Amino acid sequence: MFDVIIAGAGPTGAMLAAELRLHDVRVLVLEKESEPTPFVHIVSLHMRSLEVMAMRGLLDRVLERGRRRPVAGIFAAIAKPAPAGLDSAHAYLLGIPQPVLVGLLEEHAIASGAQLRRGCAVTGFEQDDHGVTIELAGGEQLRSRYLVGCDGARSTVRKLLGVGFPGEPSRNDTLHGVMEVRVPQEQIAATVAEARETNQRFLLRPVGEGVYSVVVPAAGISDHTEPPTLEDFRQQLRATAGTDFGVHSPRWLSRFGDATRLAEHYRIGRVLLAGDAAHIHPPTGGQGLNLGIQDAVNLGWKLAAHIRGWAPDTLLDTYQAERRPVAEDVLDNTRTQMELLSTEPDPQAVRRLLTELMDFDEVNRHLIEKITAVGIRYDFGPGPDLLGRRLHDIDLTQGRLYDRMHHGRGLLLDRSERLSVHGWTDRVDYLADSAAALDVSAVLLRPDGHVAWIGDDQQDLDEHLSRWFGRSVTDHASEPAPMPLRGR
């Protein structure tokens, strides 16, 4: 019997598997496809996701395979430079082929001890008070304490669970493909720049060796029931840019829409949803993959805490309470961006006005922090503005903060050097560093890097340790002796 079975080996499922393995949870990932997706689709890792990679010791591997670019022009493709002093040590976007990223996350999960089975489609399940019985295509049955659906927008797990997925159907379809072109790069760049002055939903981006990622509106394609053809791309390219760029030898052709939907529940009993299984929205701003990875990091330690037996009663409920409002906000901002990308006169007038407003540093900064998720603040109750926010990767006397968070545990960063995590040393690390680049006496960080407590009072700290990390070990004689991480 497994502790957790995850349906779907995309970035959300692979990240969740690795997070669970940090806590010795027995994990099986089931992927219905027999082979990894072969096509090259470039995705952008945003600032918060790059911070997550740093927190788990993955950043160097990801940076080696990606290409950095400025955090600019990501809200509705409005060309404004990023403001100075963004609140992150990783204030850039990282373009990386999605198959490469998924492969890195899969390798990380498997190296951590997760099992992965391909060609295994979930066709049914039943849950009871003790676990979930999962049925696979072919009739095989598996047993697990929990099941998590990370199986995409058409999630089988969500449908079998009977969770509503309300929202709006697609109104504006877009063609997306990877193919070769016969036109020189200089001509492509000039033509694309001219066409994008009136149509921001059009793009040709090189992915290497004469191969391009092509994005073009599908407004002239009448048959939405059939996969797009290369001729569809040629037709739409000529309509949009006046040339088909000599496209040929397609690697992959697809169509996506701007449907916007949000699951009514992220959890029913022992079955949970994450990533696109819980929310879908237009790809404007490149938020979808990042949102799923961050779902996984929020959920992983909480689900592991329940399985390990130390979670407070309401801890797992905070997954939906925290992440569903974040998805709601993403749905709202992508709806807004799609309107601003319209070529109709009224949306274009609003776009011109917003373009002016983004000359104000605070407006531009707010929108960038929204898209890149560094502006998220969970509701932990009244307190300083930092409470509920993630703490960026600050300097310590030796090294940086995120280097101390690779193991997915809580962390007390104590500049006063007077506090203690006695009773929780099996779940929370202690770091004394009087010179840490921090404006407060001490902070308690959850495993996802969000600030759960700020202060200098031991009794108040103990109450918050109990809130997030369960009851203390009352028999201190049997508790392992604390081994504080010294900052100097």
Image: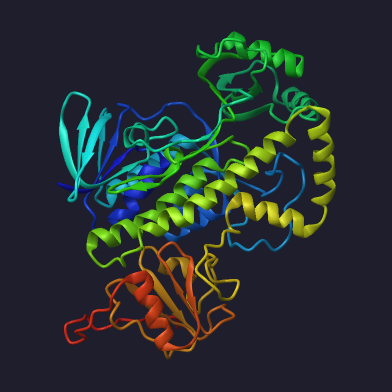
Colouring of the image: rainbow
Q: Looking at the image, which residue is at 66% across and 49% down?
A: 71
**Percent x, y for residue 435?**
53, 84
Q: Looking at the image, which residue is at 21% across and 81% down?
A: 479
Foreground residue among 34 and 459: 459
Q: Is residue 130 left or right of residue 118?
A: left
Against 204, residue 334 (above or below) is below
**Percent x, y for residue 228?**
54, 14
Foreground residue among 487 and 144: 144
Outermost residue toward the bottom? 418
User: Taking the image as drawn, is residue 92 in sight?
Assistant: no
Q: Looking at the image, which residue is at 62% across and 44% down?
A: 332
Q: Is residue 92 left or right of residue 295?
A: right
Q: Looking at the image, which residue is at 44% across and 66% down?
A: 403
User: Taking the image as drawn, is residue 72 in sight?
Assistant: yes
**Percent x, y for residue 182?**
65, 15
Foreground residue among 445 and 485: 445
- Total marks in image: 0
Q: Quadrant of residue 21?
A: bottom left
**Percent x, y for residue 133?**
18, 39
Q: Quadrant of residue 437?
A: bottom right
Against 29, residue 449 (above or below) is below
* Quadrant showing the C terminus: bottom left
